[in-house]
Image (cartoon, rainbow, N blue to C red):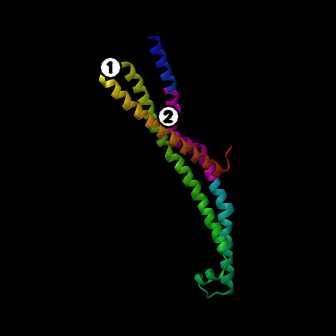
Amino acid sequence: MSSYLEAMGLLVVVGGGAFKYFVWDFFHMPQTLDERFSARLAEAHAAIHQQKFLPAMVDIYELIASRKALVPPASAIEILTELPIDRKVRETVSAVSERIELDRCYQRAARLCPWVAYPWLISILSFVGLFLARFHAGGDVKDHVLTILFAAAVLSVVTGAGAFCIFVGTRNRLLRLLGANRL
């Protein structure tokens, strides 16, 4: 009986820790990501807008305005085809794409959180079921139940571990994009 209680205590400690970190924390991770990164994302968006996008747009506007002043009857299309603004347009587009990349990376990290939490929840429940079935199931059913629960546990652990690795990679990419990666 004491070995059963020791095993039950170990199951509660390990299962509780896994539940706290992999299930509870990841169900609340989108809010945590929002709290941690929303201000930094807004700052990064503002910096991209002020340092890259606006100067390029102002340069393009000044080139067009100066050209229009020289040739007033020319249409906007004629002016745009004559001016060397390719580099400025590329700078503007790269600023917009950099901002979009930040948003996509953040949204991807937030979307991955349930894909980490649900498999680990299934895994924990499967391991608890395995533990209880090992000691309390009897007869012919025991082997089948143990096999099914073990397969479910292994499949959910592999899925949860894969989703966790993808989440960590996405979060690290977000940190690199924000310029705050510790690595």
Where residue 30 appears, x then y in whole percent? 52, 43
Q: Which mark is residue 117?
A: none
In magenta segment, residue 97:
no
Where residue 42 appears, x then y in whole percent? 61, 52
Which three-letter amino acid code belongs to the residue tagged 1? Gly
| Rendered residue at 68%/75% (across/down) | 62
Q: Name above or below for residue 158 compared with residue 131.
A: below
Instruction: In this rendered view, identify the residue nearer to me: 99 or 63.
Output: 99
Q: Main secondary structure of the magenta part?
A: helix
Give the side of residue 8 with respect to residue 136, left or right.
right
Q: Which residues are magenta?
A: 15-43
| Rendered residue at 61%/49% (across/down) | 173
* Tag 1 secondary structure: loop
In magenta segment, residue 20:
yes
Instruction: Please state the total of marks drawn on the protein image.
Output: 2
Disc 1 target residue: 138
Disc 1 versus disc 2: nearer the observer: 1
Disc 2 target residue: 24
Q: Name above or below for residue 38 compared with residue 120.
A: below
Q: Residues within 10 Å of mark 1 (few under 14, many from 20)?
A: few
Give the side of residue 117 with respect to residue 172, left or right.
left
